[in-house]
Image: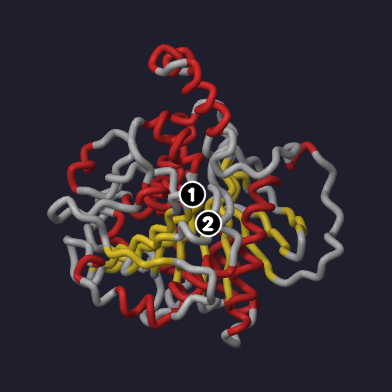
Amino acid sequence: MTKMISRALPATAVALLLAGCAMIGAPPERAPDHDAAPAAPSDAPIVADCHVVELDALSAEVEEPRERAFDGVRFRYAGSPAVVEALAAAAPQQVFVIAHGWMNDVQSGREFTGRLVKGIAERARRDGVDASRLGFVAVHWDSKRLVFHESALNAEVIGSRRVAPLLARLGERVPGAKVVLVGHSLGGRLVLSALNAEGPATQVRAHAAVLLEAAVDQDALLPERGGSLIGGFPMAPGRTPLLLNVHSRQDDVLELAYKNAMRRPALGREGADRAIGGERYARLELRAEPFDPIRLDGILTDPQSRWPGAPDRHVVNVDATAVVTGHSEVFIQPVFDLVWLAAARGGTGGGRGKTD
C-alpha cells in the first residue's frame, strides 16, 4: 500500500502524508498493556470509573477482567456482556461511549479517554450531577497500523459489528439512560459506522453523537454514498436525534494527511454537506466562553439542521476553528460543555431499537 501511495503522490506529499498520518488521533506511543506488570494505583484520587471494551488486532474482544487507574480515572476492563451488566446494575442517567482514533494502543487510548471522562464528569458536576450517576464506556481498539486505509476499514468493521450490538444491548438492559457517542478522528468513523449499521432508517441507537475532528469524508452522510464499499454513512443521521460534527479549519493533519490519503476533504475540517441543494447543515460556532444551552436549542429550530429523512433528526456543524487549534486539541472546556449539554437534552435513552 505504501508503494501504491508513493506512485500516486509526489515525494514531498508522501512525506507530509506519513508524518501527518502519524499524528491523527495519536497521543505518545506506549508499551502494550498486556506486556507490562499491573499498573500501580494512581496517586490521583479516583473521580470517575470507565468501563472498557477492548478489541485486539483481529477486532476480537479481549475479555480478561482487570483494572487500571490513570490520572484519577479507574478503568474496568471486561467483555461487552459484563460491561453492559455492570451498567445495568448501576442504572446511570447518561452513558458516554467514547472511541479514540488512529495509532493508539491500550495505554495511549486510556490516556485519551481519561481526559475526556474527567472533563465530562466535572462539567456534569457543575450541574449537580455526581459522577456516580454517569456511565462511561471506552472502546479501545488496536489502531496502530501503518497503512491508514487499513485502520479506516477496521474502524468501520468495529463500529458495525461490535459497537452497534453493544448499543442494542445497552438499550435493552439500561433503557432509561441517555446514550451519547463521542468519537475522535477515526473514532468518529467508528461512531458513524455503528449508527449506520443495518436496520430501519430511523431506528434510534443513541440519544446523541458528537464527532470530534472526524477522519471521515466531507460527503459521507449524503445519500449517494450509500453504495460505497468504505466511507459512506448516509443512514447514520437517522439513528440519533442529534449529530454534532465538531470541525476546525486549524486542523492541518486532516487537511494534509487525510486529504492526501483519501483524496477527499475531511468532515472534521470542512463540515458535513447537506443533501438538499448542495448546501451545508446548520452551523453553530464554538467559542472560548462557556457554552450557552440556549444556543444549542435555538439552532435546532433552523430547517438547515434537519436531516432530510426525518424532521426530528438533526445534524449540526459545530465550527470550532476559534478554539480547536490542532487535530488532538479537543480537551477544552467548550467541548466538554457541548458533550454534556448534548447528553442533558430532553428525551430518553439511546440504543433503544425503536423506530420513530
Residue with the mark numbered 2? 324
Classify 210 as above or below 184: below
Type of the residue with mark 1: Gln
**Cα separation between marks 2 and 1:** 7 Å
Q: Is residue 168 left or right of residue 72?
A: left
Classify 243 as above or below 134: above
Q: Residue at x 62, y 65 (%)?
A: 117
Q: Is residue 191 left or right of residue 132?
A: left
**Residue 108 spot, x, y in % from top left:** 68, 46
Asked which secondary structure carries label 2, the reply is loop
Residue at the far left: name it. Answer: 277
Type of the residue with mark 2: Val
Question: Crowding at label 2, few (<14), some or many (≥20) Cα neighbours within 10 Å?
Answer: many
Mark 2 or mark 1: name the one nearer the start of the chain. 1
Image quarter hosting the C terminus: bottom left
**Which label belongs to residue 212?**
none
Give residue 62's quadrant in the image.
Answer: top right
Q: Are marks 2 and 1 in contact (CB under 8 Å)?
A: yes
Classify 89 as above or below 29: below
Residue 211 shows up from this direction: yes
Residue at the far front: name it. Answer: 322
**Residue 26 spot, x, y in % from top left:** 61, 42
Q: Residue at x 53, y 56 (%)?
A: 324
Give residue 199's quadrant in the image.
Answer: bottom left
Q: How many marks?
A: 2
| Foreground pick, 281 / 248 | 248
| Foreground pick, 147 / 348 | 147
**Residue 64 spot, x, y in % from top left:** 68, 48
| Foreground pick, 80 / 48 | 48
Classify 348 as above or below 140: below
Residue with the mark numbered 1? 250
Question: Crowding at label 1, few (<14), some or many (≥20) Cα neighbours within 10 Å?
Answer: some
